[in-house]
Image (cartoon, rainbow, N blue to C red):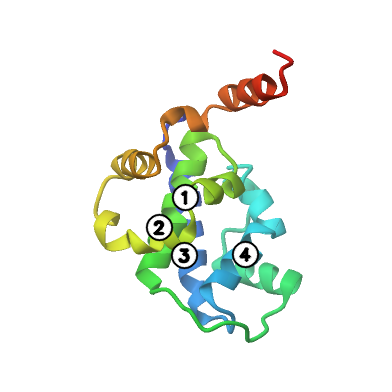
């Protein structure tokens, strides 16, 4: 596990503000999240290096819009506070566990995170991770890249 340092805080707050700002787009929250997960911006964020980003939220939103457009599609919008917390928590986990955001969204879906907002948003992020792992019948091993590779090899019978 990597320490949550100043760089991590900058990235988590940036991603939180980016998610929060998505409310102003014409598309729904699920559409924004899908676009975010396939964006060039996410690839830069997953490098976990704030010096690779401008850290301007408007610029981040514009880069996603340039890549995918801002068509009116869908009407489900999550609250700004839930979106900020969601973006922050996903980046916190991605940074501290050194895991890709796409894999993280597979483990803990955005609908689940939104549904748990009122339960978890005032808790310490580490406590939230423990809770999410518990309710999904997972352990910290899920974040260990070597464990995942070993299991894939075992399934193929080449171990």
Relative to 57, 153 lies left or right = right
Q: Earlier in the sequence, mark 3 or mark 1?
A: 3
Marks 4 and 2 in Cβ contact (< 8 Å): no
Image quarter for residue 46?
Answer: top right
Q: What percent of the width, then of the height, locates residue 158?
A: 74, 15
Q: Earlier in the sequence, mark 1 or mark 2?
A: 1
Assign a secondary structure to mark 2.
helix
Q: Earlier in the sequence, mark 4 or mark 2?
A: 4
Q: Which residue carries the number 2 mark? A: 113
Marks 3 and 4 in Cβ contact (< 8 Å): no
Residue depicted at 58% across the width and 44% down the height: 103
Report how far apart the C-alphas of labels 3 and 1 lie in the structure: 20 Å
Report how far apart the C-alphas of labels 1 and 4 lie in the structure: 14 Å
**Foreground tag (3 vs 4):** 4
Q: Which residue carries the number 3 mark? A: 17
Q: Which residue carries the number 1 mark? A: 108
Q: Earlier in the sequence, mark 3 or mark 4?
A: 3
Image quarter for residue 116?
Answer: bottom left
CA neighbours of label 3 inside 10 A, class few (<14), some (14 to 19), many (20+): many
Front one among 108 and 123: 108
Q: What percent of the width, then of the height, locates residue 133?
A: 38, 39
Marks 1 and 2 in Cβ contact (< 8 Å): yes
Q: What percent of the width, then of the height, locates residue 21?
A: 49, 73
Assign a secondary structure to mark 4.
helix
Residue depicted at 49% across the width and 77% down the height: 23
**Foreground tag (3 vs 1):** 1
Q: Which residue carries the number 4 mark? A: 34
CA neighbours of label 2 inside 10 A, class few (<14), some (14 to 19), many (20+): many
Report how far apart the C-alphas of labels 1 and 2 lie in the structure: 7 Å
Q: Locate the N terminus and report the quarter of the image it occupies.
A: top left
């Amino acid at each position: 596990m990597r320490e949550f340092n100043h760089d991590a805080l900058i990235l988590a707050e940036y991603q939180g503000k980016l998610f929060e700002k998505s409310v102003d787009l014409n598309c729904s929250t699920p559409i924004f999240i899908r676009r975010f997960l396939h964006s060039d911006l996410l690839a830069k964020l997953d490098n976990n290096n704030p010096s690779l980003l401008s850290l301007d939220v408007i610029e981040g939103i514009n880069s996603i819009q340039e890549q995918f457009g801002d068509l009116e599609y869908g009407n489900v919008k999550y609250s700004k506070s839930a979106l900020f917390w969601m973006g922050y928590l996903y980046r916190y986990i991605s940074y501290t566990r050194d895991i890709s955001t796409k894999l993280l969204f597979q483990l803990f879906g955005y609908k689940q995170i939104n549904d748990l907002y009122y339960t978890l948003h005032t808790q310490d992020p580490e406590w939230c991770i423990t809770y999410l792992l518990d309710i999904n019948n997972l352990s910290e091993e899920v974040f260990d890249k070597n464990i995942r590779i070993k299991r894939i090899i075992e399934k193929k019978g080449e171990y």
